[in-house]
Image (cartoon, rainbow, N blue to C red):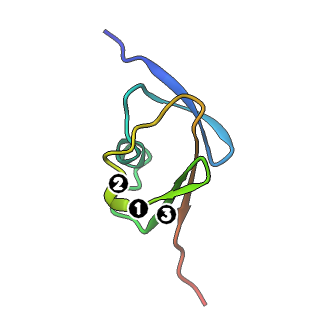
Amino acid sequence: MLESEIEIELNGAVHAVPEGGSLRDLVASLGLAGQALALAVNRSVVQRERWAATPLAAHDKVDVVRAIGGG
């Protein structure tokens, strides 16, 4: 049986994710686990400790920002 998917907006582009997934699941599916990231859902920053407990809903606007060192 196939998982049901929903569409979210990820950094301005439509992105399909499994229904019932969390922010932590999204980060893992993008191959970004363990990286220095900031996530916002519908313009509200979500603390890393809350990623696993933050479910994604259809049409959520998710922004993923990666920290990049430089000088």
**Residue where numbered disc 3 is placed:** 38
User: Which residue is pictured at 35% across the width and 42% down the height?
Assistant: 25
Q: Position of residue 30 (x, y in %)?
A: 44, 46
User: Which residue is pictured at 46% across the width and 21% down the height?
Assistant: 5
Q: In the drawing, what numbered circle is on residue 47?
A: 1
Q: CA distance from mark 1 to mark 2?
A: 5 Å
How many labels, in total? 3
> Mark 3 or 1 closer to N-term?
3
**Residue where numbered disc 2 is placed:** 50
Three-letter amino acid code at the position of disc 2: Arg
Indicate left or right for 5 with 14 as reference.
Answer: left
Q: CA distance from mark 3 to mark 1?
A: 8 Å
Disc 3 secondary structure class: strand
Q: Position of residue 6 (x, y in %)?
A: 51, 24
Indicate left or right for 35 with 67 as reference.
Answer: left
Circles 1, 2 touching at the beta carbon (< 8 Å): yes
- Please rate how many residues cluster around mark 2, counting C-alpha atoms within 10 Å: few if below 14, some from 14 to 19, many from 20: few
